[in-house]
Image (cartoon, rainbow, N blue to C red):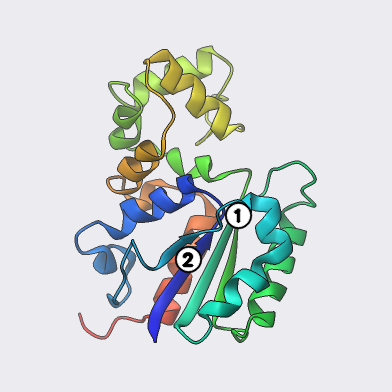
Amino acid sequence: MRPLLFLVADKNMEYTLRGFFERKNWGRIVGCDPFAFDVNRDIRVAVGQHDPGLFTRANELLRPFRSKYKHVVVMVDAEWDGSPGVDNIRSRLREHIISAGWGDDGGLSLVLDPEIDVWLWSDSPHAATAMGWSGPEELRSALEAEKLLAPGDAKPERPKEAAEWALRRRGKPRSSAIYRRIAGTVSLNRCRDPVLHELLDALRTWFPRKGP
């Protein structure tokens, strides 16, 4: 049985996870015991389902994997047409995970609020340069001037729109490769999104460190 499966709504989520798990010493970075993880095998995109499909059918999509994985994480965005809101999505995904055969402690439902793009934003220079800017100060000033970031805020209220604007101003397409690059380089401590830290806490709980 493999340790962990991610079932995600789209390729941006997939490539964010790829960037993270392709890091050297990712277990040490998280503070968990390293476990066997294959980015080509253990990250599954619910092709054709997207966020609403996972909200509705995650249990059906998960059941074939129950005998193959000890733990599972399901990831969706909070914002989509007809979304019932973060709390309802999280609760429903939790029901799906339990219905598919994982116990109370075997799975995790992660709802990115409003979207996975929130993980692009930190004060790391790597995040800014990946989007084509010289550093976080230059990018922050430009976003504030464009009213896409409020002074003193850590991240834009509309992270997807802010990312699209920042990339467009530098002539860069918004692509999954951007998510992969940022996830593979920025310090986790620089991202303040509570959902990311919920995932990190789960990894530490499921795979506690066995040594110094």
Q: In which image quadrant can residue 127 be found?
A: top left
Q: In which image quadrant can residue 63 be found?
A: bottom right
x and y percentages locating residue 99 in the rendered image = 69, 81
- Residue 192 visible within the image: no
Q: Sequence-wise, which precedes: disc 1 or disc 2?
A: 2
SS at circle 2: strand
**Rendered-image quadrant of the C terminus:** bottom left
SS at circle 1: strand
Nearest to the observer: residue 131 or residue 96: 96
x and y percentages locating residue 206 in the rendered image = 43, 81
**Rendered-image quadrant of the N terminus:** bottom left
Amino acid type at circle 2 is Phe
Question: From the viewer's perspective, is residue 113 above or below residue 69?
Answer: above
Circle 2 residues within 10 Å: few <14, some 14–19, many ≥20: many
Residue in view at x 66 percent, y 72 percent: 60
Residue in view at x 34 percent, y 54 percent: 18
Residue in view at x 36 percent, y 67 percent: 41
Q: Is residue 114 left or right of residue 203?
A: right
x and y percentages locating residue 64 in the rendered image = 55, 78
Residue in view at x 30 percent, y 41 percent: 181
Q: Is residue 131 left or right of residue 116?
A: left
Amino acid type at circle 1 is Val
Tag 1 residue: 76
Question: From the viewer's perspective, is residue 14 above or below residue 92?
Answer: above
Tag 2 residue: 6
Label 2 near label 1: C-beta < 8 Å? no
Question: From the viewer's perspective, is residue 22 above or below residue 73?
Answer: above
Question: From the viewer's perspective, is residue 43 above or below residue 107?
Answer: above
Nearest to the observer: residue 46 or residue 181: 46
